[in-house]
Image (spheres, rainbow, N blue to C red):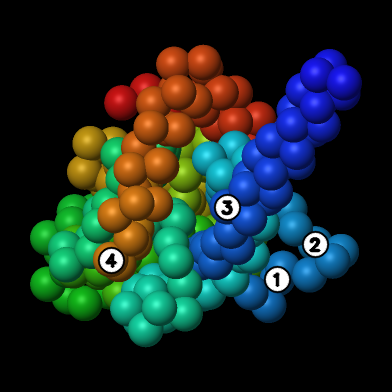
């Protein structure tokens, strides 16, 4: 009799415990910086979109997560303040908001053509020239901080054309995207005929050092101290276990979790 009582009590406690765990599960609304028009059931190929989703599920493994892509950082921050979102991913630390430790530190390359008159940040800023970004790029806020205007394009090839046609004065992509494209187009690295000005003019030239254009991406929240504590603890675990490195190499083909 006593044994049956103990079994019944244990079953009750287990059921109560499971029920408590389930009741503690929450729905977290996360805004991510991406081009919403390009994200549909058939096309979710953007690395940043995939990385953010994968990381969020590792940080909140027991919670339901809903993602809300936005094309502009300001739109994300506005929704965050209005409590339409719980968190935002893919931005650098924001003043007047709560910010987690950085989980990713992507390297970017700001560059132009050899025949450009604007081979410095100062000239680009003073002349108010536009800088090309990929439609899926998240460097908009960084360029805004540097005092630069932006224009978006669907591919690196489209950016090459825009530079050639003087639609923009410079461009910014990730280091991986930059190196990958140059590996396919060696004529953008060196001219076959150094006396051919058409070939020499099209060569790509870096404008700024990587330290200037690097980013430190964080989870951003507004009055969500408990979530931030959870994120800080989980990020430390993921970094120690090497999972941040695995995600970075999987989606960006480089380890940007090093800081």
Q: Is residue 211 above or below residue 249?
A: below
Which numbered circle lies on residue 43?
2
Q: Residues within 10 Å of mark 3 (few under 14, many from 20)?
A: few
Q: Is residue 117 above or below residue 8?
A: below
Q: Position of residue 171 (x, y in %)?
A: 41, 58
Determine the residue positioned at 52% across, 17% down. Answer: 242
Mark 1 → mark 4, Cα distance in angstroms? 31 Å
The earlier-in-sequence mark between 2 and 4 is: 2
Q: Nearer the viewer, mark 2 or mark 3?
A: 3
Q: Count the marks: how many?
A: 4
The earlier-in-sequence mark between 3 and 1 is: 3
The earlier-in-sequence mark between 2 and 1 is: 1
Mark 4 → mark 3, Cα distance in angstroms? 19 Å
Mark 3 → mark 1, Cα distance in angstroms? 34 Å
For label 3, the residue is 24
The earlier-in-sequence mark between 2 and 3 is: 3
Which numbered circle lies on residue 38?
1
Q: Is residue 209 above or below residue 83?
A: above
């Amino acid at each position: 009799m006593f044994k049956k009582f103990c079994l019944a009590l244990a079953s009750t406690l287990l059921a109560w415990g499971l029920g408590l765990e389930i009741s503690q599960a929450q729905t977290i609304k996360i805004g991510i910086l991406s081009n919403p028009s390009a994200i549909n059931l058939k096309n979710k190929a953007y690395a940043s979109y995939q990385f953010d989703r994968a990381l969020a599920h590792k940080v909140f493994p027991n919670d339901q997560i809903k993602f809300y892509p936005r094309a502009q950082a300001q739109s994300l921050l506005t929704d965050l303040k209005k409590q339409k979102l719980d968190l935002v991913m893919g931005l650098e630390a924001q003043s007047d908001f709560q910010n987690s430790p950085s989980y990713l530190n992507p390297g970017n390359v700001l560059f132009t053509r050899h025949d450009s008159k604007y081979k410095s940040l100062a000239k680009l800023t003073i002349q108010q020239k536009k800088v090309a970004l990929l439609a899926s790029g998240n460097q908009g806020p960084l360029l805004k901080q540097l005092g630069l205007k932006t224009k978006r394009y669907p591919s690196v090839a489209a950016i090459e054309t825009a530079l050639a046609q003087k639609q923009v004065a410079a461009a910014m992509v990730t280091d991986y995207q930059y190196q990958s494209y140059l590996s396919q187009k060696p004529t953008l690295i060196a001219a076959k005929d150094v006396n051919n000005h058409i070939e020499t003019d099209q060569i790509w030239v870096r404008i700024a050092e990587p330290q200037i254009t690097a980013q430190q991406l964080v989870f951003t929240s507004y009055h969500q101290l408990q979530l931030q504590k959870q994120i800080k603890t989980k990020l430390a675990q993921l970094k120690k276990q090497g999972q941040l490195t695995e995600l970075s190499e999987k989606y960006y083909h480089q380890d940007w979790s090093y800081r």
